[in-house]
Image: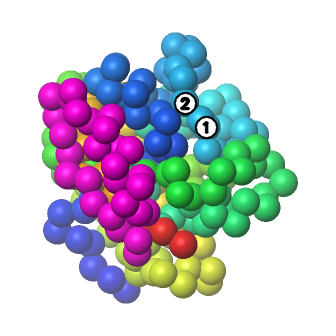
């Protein structure tokens, strides 16, 4: 079993056309806030799972807090969800644009948790997909050893799919300044992201990371 990384990074995936509203608001919003604010941008998730996260699934570490009230992150790039997007054949996925327009927003776990604690903002992590009916969750960094880090970092994850989908969940929003790096699939996507960042006060590093894609 792989050890807990000393400095874990977490990744939010989004369609590139969501960047203008993210930059305008200066933050990543949870789905609950996005729907309330009627924000622009393509949704790359599965609608019925998003609905379940918003209305049914709550966190045992924060009773009453719905998964959809939180901004979701994976503990790795090249997630199972990105594979679903790449294949484009899931019967419940409306988005059919593939992975090329999807960007990875990289965030430091420890820095984010420290900030959330100063703000009284709830956070947790799960050992599996937080859109499923069965997962465990914790709000204690000492419990990171409960995650299957071998599965999280696996490239061939079909035998460890549940562990691969561990999530970090942050209540309501994350300021844009916490995005440390943006990973894209190719040069054309890099140019589009950099064009969006021209007037941004905070400009994360933008890198072509083909190994983060299928």
Q: Quadrant of residue 89?
A: bottom right
Q: In the image, 130: left or right of 118?
A: right
Q: CA distance from mark 2 to mark 1?
A: 7 Å
* Neighbour tally class for label 1: few under 14, some 14-19, many 20 plus, Cα within 10 Å: some
Residue at the (78%, 58%) spot, across then down: 90
Decide which of 212, 6 is in the foreground and name it. 212
Q: Which mark is residue 98?
A: none
Q: In the rendered structure, which segment of residues is drawn in magenta?
A: 184-211
The percent coordinates of residue 97 (x first, y second) are: 66, 51
* Mark 2 lies on residue: 41
Residue 107 locus on image (x, y percent): 27, 49
Task: Name the residue located 53 percent from the left edge and 57 percent from the top edge.
Answer: 100
Q: Quadrant of the N terminus?
A: bottom left
Which residue is outermost to the top?
37
Vertical placement of residue 40 versus 102, above or below: above
Please name the residue shown 34% across and 49% down the image. 191
Compared to 32, does 76 lie above or below?
below
Q: Secondary structure at mark 2?
A: loop
Residue that numbered label 1 is attached to = 43
């Amino acid at each position: 079993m792989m050890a807990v990384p000393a400095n874990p990074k977490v990744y939010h995936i989004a369609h590139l056309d969501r960047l203008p509203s993210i930059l305008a608001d200066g933050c990543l919003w949870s789905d609950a806030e996005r729907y309330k604010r009627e924000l622009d941008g393509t949704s790359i998730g599965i609608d019925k799972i998003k609905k379940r996260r918003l209305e049914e699934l709550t966190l045992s570490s924060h009773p009453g807090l719905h998964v959809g009230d939180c901004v979701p992150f994976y503990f790795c790039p090249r997630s199972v969800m990105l594979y679903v997007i790449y294949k484009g054949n899931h019967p419940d996925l409306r988005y059919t644009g593939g992975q090329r327009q999807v960007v990875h927003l990289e965030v430091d776990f420890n820095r984010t948790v420290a900030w959330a604690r100063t703000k009284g903002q709830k956070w947790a992590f799960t050992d599996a997909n937080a859109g499923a009916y069965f997962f465990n969750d914790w709000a204690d960094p000492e419990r990171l050893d409960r995650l299957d880090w071998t599965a999280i970092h696996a490239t061939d994850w079909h035998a460890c799919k549940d562990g691969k989908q561990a999530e970090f969940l942050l209540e309501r929003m994350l300021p844009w300044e916490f995005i440390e790096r943006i990973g894209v699939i190719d040069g054309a996507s890099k140019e589009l992201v950099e064009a969006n960042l021209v007037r941004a006060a905070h400009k994360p590093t933008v890198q072509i990371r083909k190994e983060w894609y299928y």
